[in-house]
Amino acid sequence: MPGISAQQGVTTVNAAGGSSFASPQTGITTGTLVTLALVGATHDAYLWSLAGPAGSEAVLSDVAAAGPTFTPTIGSDAWLVILQGLDADGVVEATYLLPLSIPQVALAYFVGPLALAYVAPATIDTPGIGQFLYQDLSKAGALSAKDASAVTRQVGIVRSGTTGARPATTNLDIGTTYFDTTLAAGAGKPIYWNGTIWVLADGTAA
């Protein structure tokens, strides 16, 4: 894109004052420190402004700096950076508009033994073996993790509810427990997932 270049965490704006760049800028993700830098021109003073999507709390480190920073917190195409370059008398010499397209952070960017993340239905990006627990919104918010064979499994958590509210059985571990409040005429009974069906303690189908 003429006049704009970007790589992970760094955005530069050229000296084409007064231009409005219609195409969204790419190469930046949520949680990454972004440095704004003007190239090809200098000014006596700078006045930056940052507009983000609803709910974002990101702010510029210094609106009067030549190269301020900010960390986007929400993935969106609604980010906009505006720079006014001023001369010694405070008169605007040039205005630079930079739309930013910032995708959601991928789980692969995290490093560490354990992290908790949310995975939206349309953006499944499962983590590495043993690294993450994550709430998979494509499976009604089930807490999931990868086992040693790299199979994504729901983490077995003791919970209760009606027969109709039993957990989805996709990748449930054998022995996952659920207290079914509908059984025993409403008194409830514990049931277990045997890998194929839900069973009572004696092995009969529940």
Image (cartoon, rainbow, N blue to C red):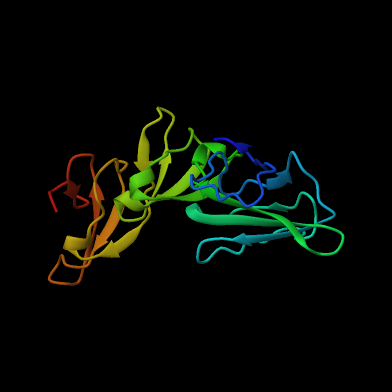
Judge from the rendering whether residue 44 lies leftward or rightward of residue 128; answer left or right. right
**Does residue 29 appear in this view?**
yes
Judge from the rendering whether residue 106 lies leftward or rightward of residue 195; answer left or right. right
Residue that extends furthest to the top in the rendered view of this protein = 149
Q: How many numbered circles does the render carry?
A: 0
Location of residue 70 with respect to 188 vertically, above or below? above
Location of residue 118 with respect to 194 vertically, above or below? below
Judge from the rendering whether residue 187 lies leftward or rightward of residue 124; answer left or right. left
The percent coordinates of residue 143 (x first, y second) are 40, 51
Of residues 70 and 86, the one nearer the viewer is 86
**Does residue 73 appear in this view?**
no
The percent coordinates of residue 40 (x first, y second) are 74, 38
Residue drawn at x 53%, y 38% as measured from the top left: 131
Of residues 82 and 119, the one nearer the viewer is 82
Quadrant, the N terminus: top right
Residue drawn at x 41%, y 30% as measured from the top left: 150
Judge from the rendering whether residue 141 lies leftward or rightward of residue 74; answer left or right. left
Q: Quadrant of the rendered structure where residue 70 is?
A: bottom right
Residue drawn at x 49%, y 48% as measured from the top left: 22
Quadrant, the C terminus: bottom left
Of residues 6 and 128, the one nearer the viewer is 6
The percent coordinates of residue 162 (x first, y second) are 20, 66
Residue that extends furthest to the right in the rendered view of this protein = 88
The percent coordinates of residue 14 (x first, y second) are 67, 41
